[in-house]
Image (cartoon, rainbow, N blue to C red):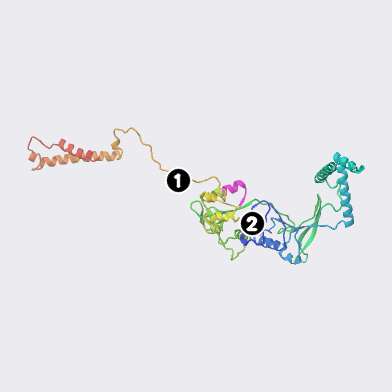
Amino acid sequence: MGLSLSASLPRHHFQNRLGGILHTVRRLIFVSGTVNFVKVVFSHGSDLDMFNGEYIWILLDVPLPGNLSEFLRPGLLSLRPDFLRTPKKQLLINFVKSSISVISEFFKDTTVASSALLATSAPVQCQVPYRNLSTSQSELHRQLKEKLATSRISKRSLPGLTPFFYVENLVPKKTGVGTQWTRVGYVNGSEVQINAIFWPGRGYKGVSEQNKRLRVVLAEAPPFVMTSALIENATCLLGVVCLRVFSTEVAAIFADMERDVVNASRGYEVVCCSGLSVDLMINVATDLEIEIQVYLVMDGTFGAPRSTGWTGIVGDLLDGSADLSFAPISVTAQRARHLDFSDPYFFSSMSILSSTKQMEVPLLAFLVPFSPDLWIAIFVSLNITAFSVAAYEWLSPFGLNPWGRQRSKNFSYGSALWVIWGLLFSHL
């Protein structure tokens, strides 16, 4: 993993790109550049708490003036080449010996070159065409070039031709004030010798192993992502601990939280996040055996394109503040051009459920709306009503049966039942 950074980058962009190392399993960090660039890297590295003993820092091709010591942390490693281990006279002799060795091996293995050399040693005649000599020289040049490209300079290691580096370690002084560079080993070709090393933040204990860490951005959207306050012992009853950030310097905010540092310019609030998306996130992190840092996007939106870039979750993913997101974010053509989406885990739709209807209607289907007890009560009340009506008509002086006298059409009990039952079934 290589990072090409510039000291002129905005602060939060520089921190987000440098903080990308925190999300990998890599533990070696090589730094190469100018003195000013090294100062910026170590300043932001301190803000991100990258000198806590989890990483090995090695300086390459970096001048180390005295005023740079205040920016460097104990435990750094530096590779310093040694060009003066072999005298210049001996170095020149070694180069000449190596060149002669390569050329002699070339003439032994190349028949065309040998014949060309013999041709140049014979007496030159004016009748020899110039093009033949030119062809032999071109072929000689081509094969010599191939030999130099595929051959070793020498079969044995000659002093001055093998790269030699001293390994130096920045350790605290014995007085306890300041630091100093101490030589702890060397690299001579394939030979490496290293003594005890003082590591950043851990002394001589060494660097520990750590799982891959990813930063996840969320946006509040019930029931997928919901927030709640911490309980009394600063833990979450449901979900996971997440941060509500009030600054774009997300990487530095998490570093402040781990070190329990309060920075007024990088405010945050610790809350609990739960919901369907959070449960899915926890299961994925458990299956992949990764560590996650969760925070809520500052503007609370999913993301929309603006003249200055994307906002919301999409903006944080594009500028490196977050590595991934678990949120109910819609897949649009614009977003798909910049982000990679997983398979949808939730579909928003509406369904209507209805019971199946029986094709055959039973004969007593009209009795279904009421219970049997209610129907019995209705039938009994109808008969009582019919009897009452018949008695009233029989005793009324103005009815169809005045004082019980017989007529051609009398209103009997049967007539009352007919009327009452007819009224009932006419309303069913």
The region drawn magenta spans 282-291
Q: Within 10 angstroms of label 2, few (less than 14), some, or many (20 or more) residues?
A: some
Question: Which residue is more in the foreground, 290 or 368?
Answer: 290
> Which residue is more in the foreground, 7 or 217?
7
Residue 380's mark?
none
Viewer can see residue 278: no
Nearest the eye: 245 or 147:
147
Q: Is residue 28 above or below residue 47?
A: above
Taking the image as shown, residue 343 lies to the left or right of residue 22, namely: left
Helix or strand or loop: what does disc 2 sit on? helix
Q: Residue at x 89, y 55 (%)?
A: 90
Where, by quadrant of the figure, is residue 181 drawn?
A: bottom right
Whole-percent x, y for residue 312 in the image: 54, 56
The answer to which of marks 1 and 2 sits earlier in the sequence is: 2
Residue, disc 2: 17
Disc 1 or disc 2, which is closer to the eye?
A: 2
As measured in the structure, the alpha-carbon distance from the residue carrying label 1 to the one carrying label 2 is 40 Å
List x then y, in percent, for residue 378. 24, 40
Q: Are marks 1 and 2 in contact (CB under 8 Å)?
A: no
Give the x, y percent position of residue 280: 55, 48
Q: Amino acid at mark 1?
A: Ser
Q: Can you see residue 38? A: yes
Residue 66 percent location from the top left of the image: 76, 66
Location of the C terminus (image quadrant): top left
Q: Which residue is mark 1?
A: 349
